[in-house]
Image (cartoon, rainbow, N blue to C red):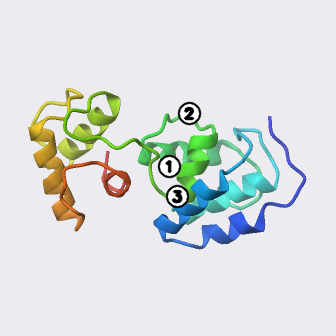
Amino acid sequence: MYTEEQTPNNQAMDLVADTNSQSNIAFAEASGLNKPTLRRGSTGPTVKELQQLLSHWKYYFGLIDGIFGVVVEKAVKGYQHRVFLVEDGVVGDRTWQALYSGAPDKPTVKIGSSGEDVKIVQNVLKLNGFYKGSVDGYFGSITEAAVKKFQTAKGLLADGIVGSKTWYALSKLPH
């Protein structure tokens, strides 16, 4: 269990107020976030930082008290769901990265790609009426057309490639 007595990094706290996800991504990548793993029972200023980040993304509405309890855990799981992470309520490197960037940390997928990340794309697009094919994990021409349709609807470059901007837009959809 993590308990901290130091004050949080002020540079990190200033970033919470910046809603430009691209600058957050750049900061997170450049800084190589080095945060402790937090879970229910953790306490201290880093938990306050977590609570502020969750509050910023509108997943936590409780007190910023530095106590990682059941309510914070539920908020973490909700945020993890939004950014396509394992919903375990534990805040490790990937969850910290997503909290600072506001976006999923996912690989680029395109024609010829296959696997779980393609299934995520297909499922989210299907749930939101952009994809009519089967959720089979293969990125073929039907998936590409659905991605292009989605990208056009969201004002993105309609190239049929799911990169960071498209992943971010997908994470905003119900899923």
Quick check: 82 left or right of 112?
right
Vertical side of 115 occupied by 61: above or below: below
Q: What mark, if any, has residue 101 been given in the picture?
A: 3
Q: Residue at x 15, y 40 (%)?
A: 143
Q: Quadrant of residue 45?
A: bottom right
Query: Mark 3 is on which residue type?
Result: Ser
The type of residue carrying mark 2 is Asp
Q: Is residue 101 above or below residue 107?
A: below
Dot 1 crowding, Cα within 10 Å, few <14, some 14–19, many 20+: many
Residue 141: image location, x then y, percent: 10, 39
- Residue at the spot of label 1: 79
Nearer to me, 43 or 146: 146
Which mark is first along the chain, 3 or 1?
1
Precedes in sequence: disc 2 or disc 1: 1
Q: Residue at x 47, y 46 (%)?
A: 105
Instruction: Report the Cα–Cα distance between label 3 and label 2.
Output: 19 Å
Could you tell me which residue is drawn at 56 percent across and 65 percent down? 56
Give the alpha-carbon distance from disc 1 to disc 3, as whole Å: 12 Å
- Which mark identifies residue 88? 2
One can see residue 160 in this view: yes
